[in-house]
Image (cartoon, rainbow, N blue to C red):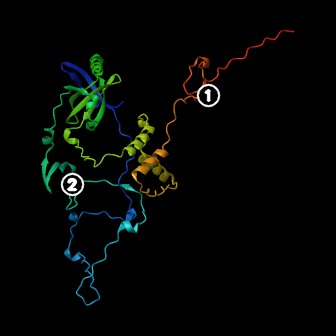
Amino acid sequence: MPRPSWKGVLRLSLVSCPVYLLPATTKTKTIRLNQVWVPTEPPHARERMVPRAEQAPEDDDDMEEEPQPRRRSTGRDAIEPAPPPPNPLLTSPEPTGAATRISLRPHDPYTGAEVERTEVVKGYEYDRGQFVTFTPDELKALEPESTGAIDLSTFVPRADVDPLYFNTPYFVYPDGRIAVEAFGVLNAAMTEAGLAGIGRITLSRRVRLALVEPRDGGMVLITLRANEEVRAANFGKADADADPEMVDVAAAIINRRLGDFDPSTFRDSYQEGLKQLIDAKLKGLPLKTQPERAPAAVVDLMTALKRSLAQDTPPEPKSKPKSRATTKDRRQTNLLLPVPGKPRAAPTVAAPRIKRRKA
């Protein structure tokens, strides 16, 4: 069972109910790829690199002269530039050592000297290369004081809250036996009214707007994004109305694909493919290459809709209707009224049964 993310009270006016929050979602265990370095030289041939600022020659006489650029053999007073160094990415040298995980450390970008982490502070770049810095105490003073309560100040229909504002969901549980009664009363009242409560909660040093709704005898709290965190839609205006015939074909395709929402059918194909690739490399198996897909031919929208409708198979009906040809006509034909313009069918009379005498 995960640890509670928050403990406090759920408060409606003067009614307080001790509750705690548990995350309603979890992150799948994804495969993380680290940055590693595969050396191209054996360990004994590699020398420890010293930053430029730490390199100090003992004597100027021991310094080697920089190679002068070569002059061309022609009579022009032109200097031929030195050839560029070979690109290691193009030469592709064979690795000679095992892959080693690298670490990123703070350093001076000018001298390359390593910087102690205790000397690193937070700063805001208000202009290019210009920062205003903050001390930990200054940032701590900005943290809001937690009241330890979720005050339900407003109640709204659940459908009135735009899902774009939904952030993180939590399950709300009563904290202790004394909270069960108050929790049940609040849950039943909101369920009967069909409303969700809006309140505020302090989580992770931030005051957040939250929605509390009843669900399956319990409650769910969903933190909401602030108004400035949701961008305004800019869809524009359609130049012309949609073709009614195309709309009908698209509606037919949609009706054939009606179903129930089942999140278990979704699979992360990238993570599954990455796991298979790792297993193949560890076992030395040949790698499977994906065939290149040919670009689809450009067709007009109506043709694409008709092809999609032809490919989609309609769902099988739950029960097959009985055929009219096999249905027995239970009407009494001798009591049917004649229909004008239609000859009346002659009534069928059952042949009398003949009793045979016993010899």
**Label 2 Cα neighbours within 10 Å, binned few <14 / some 14-19 / many ≥20:** few
Q: Quadrant of the C terminus?
A: top right
Q: CA distance from mark 1 to mark 2?
A: 90 Å
Toward the right, the furthest residue is: 359
Q: Which residue does the numbered mark 2 point to in the structure image?
A: 115
Residue 304 in the image: above or below residue 6: below
Depth order, front residue of 340/43: 340
Is residue 103 visible to the viewer in this orientation of the structure? yes
| Residue drawn at point x = 22 percent, y = 87 percent | 77
Toward the top, the furthest residue is: 358
Depth order, front residue of 247/41: 247
Give the amino acid at mark 2. Val
Q: Residue 326, which numbered label?
A: 1
Toward the bottom, the furthest residue is: 75
Residue 154 in the image: above or below residue 71: above
Q: Secondary structure at mark 2?
A: loop
